[in-house]
Image: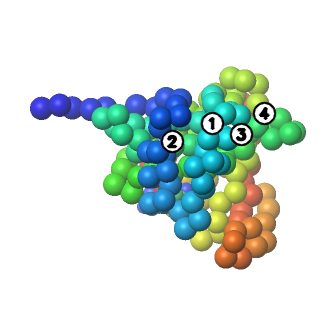
């Protein structure tokens, strides 16, 4: 019997198709392939995938903002692989890369109705700092959340 383990590593261009498969299963307004390619080109060290038997089952992508803060642009896990700690492991992995590079903090936006993601972020020490009104195309508000990486 072949047994695979879950592995986290940097995304490569050939992983983008798998990232998009996870993306369309996860979001009402998915990012386009071009957005992922751009993020991969600009911030390859902060675009991580989780793979099971070579198949992409989750990803996280982060950018560096102009003020030097890290910015988690998106994270998603294949619905069949949720609740197994993959989301938490992906965030921790990208945070540790940001910290290693001297980044002082990280921000992200999350839909106010996304209670599962909010719980994930709060559990990892993110604090709600502001409500961003009409942030999403359907008019839903977002929470801006921030975590200090200086510890
Ligand atoms: C949010 C998401 C990435 C979490 O990924 P995941 O791999 O299932 O999460 P984990 O198994 O690592 O769980 C981490 C924490 O999330 C929370 N969580 C996960 N599933 C949950 C559920 N069904 N109900 C409540 N809280 C849940 C818990 O706080 C959990 O911590 P715990 O296990 O210590 O209780 C995943 O649900 C997803 O892809 N959602 C759709 C895309 C999305 O909303 N992305 C975030 C955009 S801002």
**Disc 3/disc 2 C-alpha distance (Å):** 17 Å
Q: Say whether mark 3 is within 8 Å of ligand 1.
A: no
The residue carrying pointer 3 sits among few (fewer than 14), some (14 to 19) or many (20 or more) residues within 10 Å by Cα, namely many
Assess whether mark 1 and mark 2 are in contact (beta carbons under 8 angstroms). Answer: yes
Assign a secondary structure to mark 4: loop
**Disc 4/disc 3 C-alpha distance (Å):** 13 Å
Report whether 32 appears left or right of 77.
right
Residue beneath label 2, please? 16
Residue beneath label 1, please? 40
Give the percent coordinates (x, y) of residue 112. Answer: 65, 69
Earlier in the chain: of badge 4 and badge 1, it is 1
Residue 55 occupies quadrant = top left
The residue carrying pointer 2 sits among few (fewer than 14), some (14 to 19) or many (20 or more) residues within 10 Å by Cα, namely some
Report whether 40 appears left or right of 80.
right
Q: Is residue 107 visible?
A: yes
Earlier in the chain: of badge 1 and badge 3, it is 1
Residue beneath label 3, please? 63
Residue beneath label 4, please? 104
Earlier in the chain: of badge 4 and badge 2, it is 2
Question: Residue at image x 76%, y 73%?
Answer: 134
The residue carrying pointer 1 sits among few (fewer than 14), some (14 to 19) or many (20 or more) residues within 10 Å by Cα, namely many
Tag nearer the camera, 1 or 3: 1
Q: Is 6 located above or below residue 18 in the figure?
A: above
């Amino acid at each position: 019997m072949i047994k695979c383990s879950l592995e986290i590593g940097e995304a490569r261009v050939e992983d983008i198709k798998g990232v998009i498969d996870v993306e369309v299963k996860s979001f009402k307004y998915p990012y386009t392939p071009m957005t992922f390619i751009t993020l991969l080109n600009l911030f390859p060290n902060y675009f991580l995938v989780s793979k099971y038997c070579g198949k992409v089952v989750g990803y996280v992508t982060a950018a560096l903002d102009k003020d030097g803060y890290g910015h988690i642009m998106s994270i998603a896990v294949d619905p069949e692989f949720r609740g197994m700690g993959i989301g938490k492991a992906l965030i921790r992995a990208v945070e540790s890369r940001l910290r290693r590079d001297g980044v002082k903090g990280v921000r992200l936006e999350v839909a106010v109705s996304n209670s599962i993601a909010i719980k994930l972020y709060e559990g990892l020490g993110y604090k709600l700092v502001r409500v961003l009104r009409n942030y999403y195309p359907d008019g839903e508000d977002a929470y801006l959340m921030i975590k200090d990486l200086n510890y």
